[in-house]
Amino acid sequence: MNAERPLRADAVRNRAQVLEVAEALVAERGFGVPVSAIAKEVGVGVGTVYRHFPTKEALFAAILARKMDELVDVLRGFAEGDDPAAAFGEFIAYIIERTVRDRSLYQGLAEVADVEIGPGSDLGAEMFAAEGRILERAQAAGAVRRDFDAADLKSLIAGCIVMAEHGTAPARVVELALKALAP
């Protein structure tokens, strides 16, 4: 029986450092950043990076999973907020700001790592569930019209992101979206 042994404490630290540095370098330099540059920045050998992540794509998939986990945690906070109407507005503002800032990183990581992040994927399912919960609670609180569904929400957010990318202030985009959704 060859059960996987738990990682030693230094290996856990190395893996976490590789992820953190790789994420920063990819954001700064793009997806062409060499694994050797990541290893050098962390202060480990290339072999250490490949021991944790057998391919560059596996490293990018791990970064994407980490970013998606962080996003889901934030969305769950909005989904359980005390004021569902305010939480909905804060959610829209957060998604617009975060996506405008990190859009290429999310899309690029998913493409380079060949990872699906849609509603049916493991990574996307929790995110879409949290978004649905935020919408349902806002509708129950009377802040969002009842004929608006999760698919509409995705389309609205995509449109809001495009507006923000083309120069409309994010606060203005959120204001317009919330007015359009009012019952």
Image: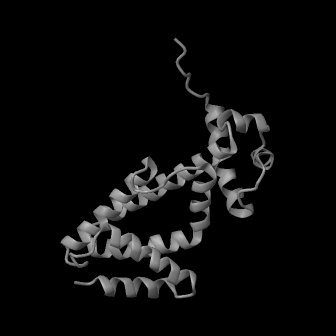
- Comparing 43 with 158, the one in front is 158
Q: Is residue 8 left or right of residue 120?
A: right
Residue at image location 62% in from the left, 43% down from the top: 58
* Residue 138 position in % (x across, y down): 25, 72
Image quadrant of residue 140?
bottom left
Instruction: From this view, report whether residue 113 is shown above or below residue 101.
Output: above
Residue at image location 22% in from the left, 73% down from the top: 139
Q: Quadrant of the C terminus?
A: bottom left
Instruction: From this view, report whether residue 122 is shown above or below residue 89.
Output: above
Total numbered badges shown on the rendered structure? 0
- Comparing 170 with 104, the one in front is 104
* Residue 143 position in % (x across, y down): 24, 79
Q: Is residue 90 left or right of residue 54?
A: left
Q: Indicate the colouring scheme.
A: one colour
* Residue 69 position in % (x across, y down): 47, 52
* Residue 175 position in % (x across, y down): 39, 86
Instruction: From this view, report whether residue 65 is shown above or below residue 53.
Output: below
